[in-house]
Amino acid sequence: MKTRNGRNWALGITIIAAFCLAAAVAAPNDGAVLQAFLKGVANGASLSWTGTDYCGGTWNGVTCSGGNVVQLRLRDSGLGGTVTPTLNQLTDLTFLELPNNGFTGAMPSLAGMANLQNVYLHQNNFTSIPGDFFNGLTNVVNLYIDRNTGLNGTAGWTFPEAITASTLLANLSVASTNLNSIPDYVAAMPSLRVLLAAYNNIPSIPAAFAGSNIEVLQVNNQGGMKGTMAPCGQMPAVKLLWLQVNQLTGPIPDGLVDAKGLTDLRLNDNLLVGQIPMGLANLPITTAFLKNNYLSGQMPPFPGTVNVSSDAADFCAAGGSPCSAQVTALLQFLKDAGYPETLSQSWIGADPCVGWSGVTCAGTDVVSLSLAKVGFTGTISPFLANLTSLRQILLNDNALTGSIPTALTTLPVLQTLDVSNNNISGLVPIFSSNVTFRSTGNPLLGTVLPPPSSAPGSPGATPGAASGSSSSSNVGMIVGIVVGVLALVIAVVILAICLKRRKKRKYSSLMQGQNTVVHPQGDSGSDPELGKIVAGHRAAQATDGTRTNYSGPSDYQVEEGDHLGTSYEVLREVTENFAEKNVLGKGGFGVVYKGTFPDGTMVAVKRMEAAVMSTKGLKEFQSEISVLSKVRHRNLVELKGYCAYRNERLLVYEYMAQGTLAQHLFEYKALGTSPLEWTRRLSIALDVARGLEYLHGLAHKSFIHRDLKPSNILLGDNWHAKVSDFGLVKLAPENNFSVETRLAGTFGYLAPEYAVTGRVTTKADVFSFGVCLMEMMTGRRALDETELEENMHLVTWFRRTNTSQETFINCIDPTITVDDETLKSLNTVSDLALLCTQREPYQRPDMAHAVNVLKPLVEQWKPAKTLTGESSEEIDLQLTLPEALKQWQDLEDYSFTGGDDRSRTSTGIPVKPHDFANTFTSNDGR
Ligand SMILES: *[C@@H]1O[C@H](CO)[C@@H](O)[C@H](O)[C@H]1NC(C)=O
Ligand SMILES: *[C@@H]1O[C@H](CO)[C@@H](O)[C@H](O)[C@H]1NC(C)=O
Ligand SMILES: *[C@@H]1O[C@H](CO)[C@@H](O)[C@H](O)[C@H]1NC(C)=O
Ligand SMILES: *[C@@H]1O[C@H](CO)[C@@H](O)[C@H](O)[C@H]1NC(C)=O
Ligand SMILES: *[C@@H]1O[C@H](CO)[C@@H](O)[C@H](O)[C@H]1NC(C)=O
Ligand SMILES: *[C@@H]1O[C@H](CO)[C@@H](O)[C@H](O)[C@H]1NC(C)=O
Ligand SMILES: *[C@@H]1O[C@H](CO)[C@@H](O)[C@H](O)[C@H]1NC(C)=O
């Protein structure tokens, strides 16, 4: 719009004459504009504008300055008619005040009135707002055009973007003007403090209210404003907030309590749900209208002077009393789950057992939440764990995100948890075997979150800590520790129960049933193989301490217990995509990687070689693994689970911090450690003997290791030794060249009959054990290709050399200090080794014999060790006294409980908590 002041007009007229013929209906000066104004007014006589001296002070409402009109103020003057559209030619006008009259027709355009500061055109009967009305109002501060009811019949209007030039605008009143939106650029205007826009058709609260400095906001009575009031939770300056009589949904935002100056809050007659932020009671509120919503929970304890209007029955109690624990938990759960509208409208009042949709009670206890397809969009709240009577939780077919809170594993009587078809991610916590857990249709489930910055399980973790986690100050870690301790306590209880009941469990149910943590049923459209997992027995380590309760191997059983659930994705993540730096070792069956879970738990993941597995079907693999997973003993490395995904076969074992015996015998220099002392080797030998004895004694199926060698003997903390890889040979395809290839590496350990005929009995393991004993004595490998051909084969060499005491001494590993006592036990072990490596299987003893020979040697060594200064090597001087004591105690426990399962029939040995603590920390990689 072209606007000129009178002086410039003369110049412009020659150039745009044609335009001027149409526009210049009034004279280009203030007098002419006033005359035009007078002409439009229906009852102009009442103004007594007579003569021509409009600045003379006789013209009602007109004020001049320097010969120009600066104010036109005719408030409540009973005027009618229209206002001249040339009004904006009064370019010096700062004050335009025409409210409470009967003006009709179009509002005068204010375009270009750069001096105008105050505009009051409210309470007239204008029927339209010119498109250029707001143009160039660069100095306007107060702009009131409200209650022009003539605008009602029109299509409605909104602010043009030009209004953003009005950077000083502080008070804007547009109530009852048929306004149909508040654009964000208005909501965000920098000086805006008061926005009165009630009784319009604004469809929703503009997002840009968030972060604004608005102090007074009235957008009540929009005839159906929808959406949430979330942006109002970020208006720290707001003092008066009127949103009443709309259709707002969702909760009252918590951020509202940051509006420290809030005095007048009107939210009545909406569809608001959820709890009222408690902090509102601390604000200087004098009016809080909350009626006719679906608010619930505890009413904030507003002071008695506050005019609160609410529906008392919706809340737990009058006078701000708190809700019952159940209601608190349910409402917190609902909040975290995103307050879906319909459900939230149902969960009001003090009693969840009456009329709360999806909630089922037994007596007054909430026992079931049946909340499939209710429109959850948030997360699964840990507060659910407070509902301790819950047996069933169905949350399937919603849009929940986040992870499954570990706290849910503490629900004591939980039977069913269904989170299928949501968008859950994170690791699956370990539920009791009593829990049927359904999780199909969550493609991100099992995705590992980034590990916490201070890595747990790092060196320096307190050895005696009751959890694998380090002393991180991270809150999450603390929570983790607390949960861990809880889980531990629960594990103890569960174990006690299990040991009493001795409940047997078929592996098939491990595979298909409730234990399976991640177990797509194939109905989700995802790869049915993905994450097919299994059932590691995380609590199994803990059972070691009580294993002496068993009367023998025939008593072997798989307890119901907690299971380590992991999908391929998880294993891939914890091994950092099978990173080279995580390789723990490579063997005939594949590469072993270290895997570190975010909570610090470490595992060893064996990624089977494709060649080894290729001919084995999934079923066959599973049935083999199922057997292996049942074999558990304190001297056998625990198979925690496996994962079969496409062609990948992954086995998950417990992590053994000290690596393999082979490393300590043959590669200690490279490792930078000192060579093993003889006494330590002895105790390792005894451990291995016990592990093998147990394997061989298994009732249903005599287990043959077939591949015993120092690289399959793993060492944990305190040098406990465990045998690994038992049974894997059977997994390999028979009659396949790859077997030979693999056996080549193991050749030195192979019993002759096995090597020649392929027939194998437990005595083949005894032979290999004898070879291991020789390696421990000599520090030489079974097959040493660096030696002359006749000396290459350890067994042959040892037999040949060990003919007299003098030559025998030459066989001994030079790192072993040979005193009289050591020599005695070396001789005994040498005899045992020779016996074990007899040519004919029947000439070899069984493992029980080996255990009997070794046991006294180890026990004999024990007291000597604690009496002499040897312990100064055994016990790390950096340990505190209690830690050192504990380590010593652990060694004692170890020698006491370790091994001989069959000879111990006593029951009732109490489960010592520190045993559990110790086993749990054994993974922390100290
Ligand atoms: C407003 O104008 C309409 C016609 O445009 C008229 O019918 C109505 O009576 C007027 N209202 C007032 C309050 O002047
Ligand atoms: C205009 O609308 C407002 C609110 O919507 C109403 O109060 C008023 O009576 C209406 N006026 C006319 C003339 O329709
Ligand atoms: C806005 O309006 C209020 C009430 O009329 C007034 O007190 C205040 O001074 C105005 N703000 C400005 C910046 O003029
Ligand atoms: C509370 O506000 C309502 C609505 O304005 C009013 O009717 C009522 O009198 C007020 N009550 C008190 C105690 O001020
Ligand atoms: C409920 O659970 C929360 C979060 O898990 C916890 O902080 C709170 O202490 C529990 N409250 C009760 C009463 O158990
Ligand atoms: C699931 O959540 C992730 C983020 O956690 C998001 O990127 C993805 O779009 C969501 N998928 C669906 C189907 O909602
Ligand atoms: C499993 O449920 C049975 C029967 O309800 C109960 O006796 C047992 O203690 C539960 N076991 C666990 C581990 O919660």
Image: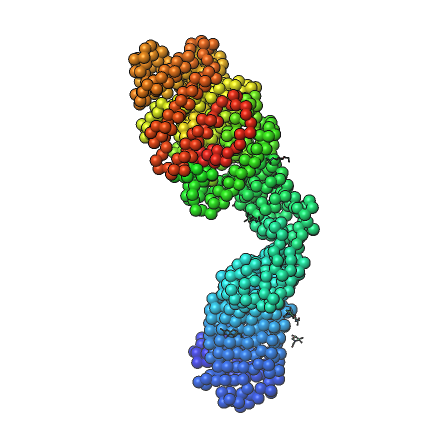
Quadrant (top left, top right, bottom left, bottom right) of the C terminus: top left
Displayed quadrant of residue 792: top left
Q: Is residue 310 above or below residue 898?
A: below
In this view, the residue farthest toward the front is 867
Count the labels in the image: 0
Colour style of the rendered protein structure: rainbow
Lateral position of residue 349 relative to residue 189, left or right: right
Q: Can you give x and y, in whole percent of width and height, for residue 873 in the image?
A: 34, 30
Lateral position of residue 804 relative to residue 56, left or right: left
Please give the name of the residue rendered at 59% of the width and 70% of the height, measured from the top-left corner.
Answer: 175
Q: In this view, does 811 lie above or below 145?
A: above
Displayed quadrant of residue 822: top left
Instruction: Specify the quarter for ligand 1.
Output: bottom right
Please give the name of the residue rendered at 44% of the width and 23% of the height, measured from the top-left corner.
Answer: 687
Q: Can you give x and y, in whole percent of width and height, for residue 353 in the image?
A: 68, 49
Q: In this view, does 751 lie above or below 234?
A: above
Please give the name of the residue rendered at 35% of the width and 25% of the height, measured from the top-left corner.
Answer: 676
Q: Is residue 314 visible in this depiction of the protein?
A: yes
Q: Nearer the viewer, residue 124 or 344?
A: 344
In this view, the residue farthest toward the bottom is 51
Q: Can you give x and y, in whole percent of width and height, for residue 248 in the image?
A: 61, 59
Q: Is residue 240 visible in this depiction of the protein?
A: no
Q: Nearer the viewer, residue 891 or 27?
A: 891
Please give the name of the residue rendered at 57% of the width and 33% of the height, measured from the top-left corner.
Answer: 496
Displayed quadrant of residue 686: top left
Q: Nearer the viewer, residue 771 or 863?
A: 863
Q: Which of 813 and 707 is in front in this view?
A: 813
